Amino acid sequence: MTDDVHSLIGAYVLDALDDIDRAAFDRHLRDCDVCRLEADELFEVTARLADGAWSVPPPRLRDNVMAEITNTRQLPPAIPPRPQQRSRRGLRLVAAAAAVVTAAGAAGVVYQIQDQRVRETQSRLEAARASEARVRSILGAPDVQTRSEQLKSGGQVTVASSRLQNAGVILLAADSAPGPGRVYQMWTIQAGAPASAGALGVGQAAAVQVVEGLPGMSNVGVTIENAPSSATPTAPLDALVNLA
């Protein structure tokens, strides 16, 4: 866990910590009134959107790649070897040396892979914290307006919009994911022209999406498309939220 445990509160609320870090942060919350209060406030933010539904695919760091390097110790012969023995022994030494070199090279590759994964995980956590902060700024704006519509397939889409922030938040909370090979996709619509606001992954039924410039749009729509997404919305829309 990072030395600044307080900085993990955003990732904790977004369920972006692994099991070990989450358990450690749970223990930290029992002793830190400031973090506990901030965590409660962040959980309340999610409740404002749609019945407490806040689903962000959590970034999970895969298990560390382990590498084992085998060292072969060569014992000197008791008597000088015959030419054929020297040849065979030489082959064994070459094979052993090659194995050590290969293992050392593999260790270097493993280190690079693991280092890249750590960097990617840190980037995802930073992005999660930035997204959380943006959501809070939009929902905390004095002019924020919230509108909701039911999904025909079951569930709800909620849109919170702030002109002062010139942005909005779309919360999609469906009852279940679409069928195999199908995904939910969100759209912003202005003067009848739709633009994709993001598609969920296969098997996903909920998501939160920040959309910059949303107050300038007239509608937000939701469709069910073939995975991974569509360039244009497929009729009929599963939901249409009027922002006017």
Image: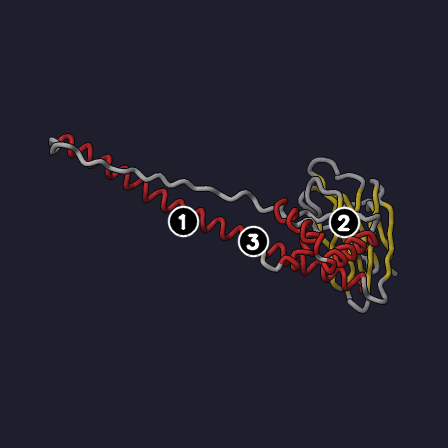
Q: Is residue 87 above or below residue 167?
A: above
Please state which of residues 214 and 9 is positioned toward the viewer in this rendering: 9
Quick one: label 1, few (<14), some, or many (20+) residues within 10 Å? few
Q: Position of residue 102 (x, y in %)?
A: 34, 43
Quick one: label 2, few (<14), some, or many (20+) residues within 10 Å? many
Kindly tell me whether residue 59 is visible in this rendering: no
Mark sitting on residue 139: none
Q: Which residue is mark 1?
A: 108
Left or right, residue 98 beside residue 192? left
Q: Earlier in the sequence, mark 3 or mark 1?
A: 1
Q: Which residue is mark 2?
A: 54
**Label 3 residue SS:** helix
**Label 1 residue SS:** helix
Q: Earlier in the sequence, mark 3 or mark 2?
A: 2
Q: In whole angstroms, how far apart are the C-alphas of marks 3 and 1? A: 18 Å
**Label 2 residue SS:** loop
